[in-house]
Image (spheres, helix red, strand yellow):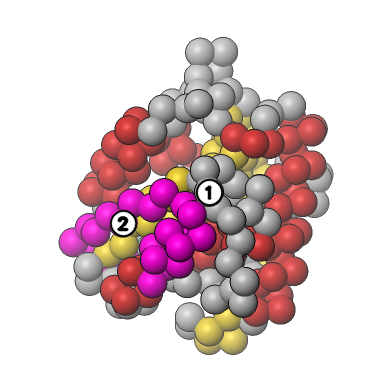
Amino acid sequence: MSDLGFVHRFEPATPEGSKETLLLLHGTGGNENDLLSIGRAVAPGAALLAPRGKVLEHGMPRYFRRLAEGVFDLEDLKARSFELADFVARAAGHYAFDPERVLAVGFSNGANIAGAVMLLRPRCLAGAILLRPMVPFTPEKLPSLAGTRVLVAAGRSDPVVAASQSEELAALLRSAGSDVTLHWSPGGHTLDRSDLAAATAWWRAVPAK
Ligand code: MLT
């Protein structure tokens, strides 16, 4: 679908499924289909909303511009974060899901914009599973993320994200009041079984309110 401002996929919740909606955000070069199977595995029966990033880097979709690997165009990042948050609100009205129960599942570039949305529009996401995220930017003033929950899934041998970045992000979100779990997998900048197991266990450990 290409309406509501983003090319996207939406799968409604099943009647017995979770009341949460997962916002699935792919990595650089990915698309709206990439994380559907992870979403279904983590939260069976939950609604899934998967927009495709609109910024093209040598033809590869992303959610915001970067100047180099790990060096973000902060103006674009912020504008795109608000645009994505507005899309989620519009989609909630259109598909009739609860806007207060949206959790992001983002990988790499998708995790980075999910983190930015939490910092810039703290009411947009009730939580997030951030797979190989960086610190998107350091806010001058911390928002209140009380009541949100976040899983930061980092890779011990990630060549793109230094371990200190993962720790810094976890600390930043914690200091804003979020309930943060930091999970280390032995792998690099790709997902492995340990990430899926951690995400599934994290999801199950915090039942929906
Ligand atoms: C980013 O640009 O968000 C990060 O460098 C991760 C990536 O997309 O490779």
**Lower position in the chain sequence, tag 1 or tag 2:** 1
Residue 203 in the image: state x and y as whole percent: 38, 36
Residue positioned 22% across, 63% down in the render:
187
* Helix, strand or loop status at disc 1: loop
* Helix, strand or loop status at disc 2: strand
Q: Nearer the viewer, residue 82 or 26?
A: 82
- Please state if 70 lies on the left or on the right of 60 as rendered: left
- Please state if 150 lies on the left or on the right of 102 as rendered: left
Residue hosting label 2: 182
Name the residue furthest top. Answer: 15
Q: How many marks?
A: 2
Residue 106 in the image: state x and y as whole percent: 49, 54
- The residue at label 2 has a CB less than 8 Å from ligand 1: no
Residue 131 in the image: state x and y as whole percent: 40, 57
Q: Is residue 113 visible?
A: no
Residue positioned 59% across, 35% down in the render:
101
Q: Amino acid at mark 2?
A: Leu
Residue 125 in the image: state x and y as whole percent: 60, 47
Residue positioned 56% across, 13% down in the render:
15
Residue positioned 71% across, 45% down in the render:
88
Residue hosting label 1: 146
Q: Which residues are magenta?
A: 168-189
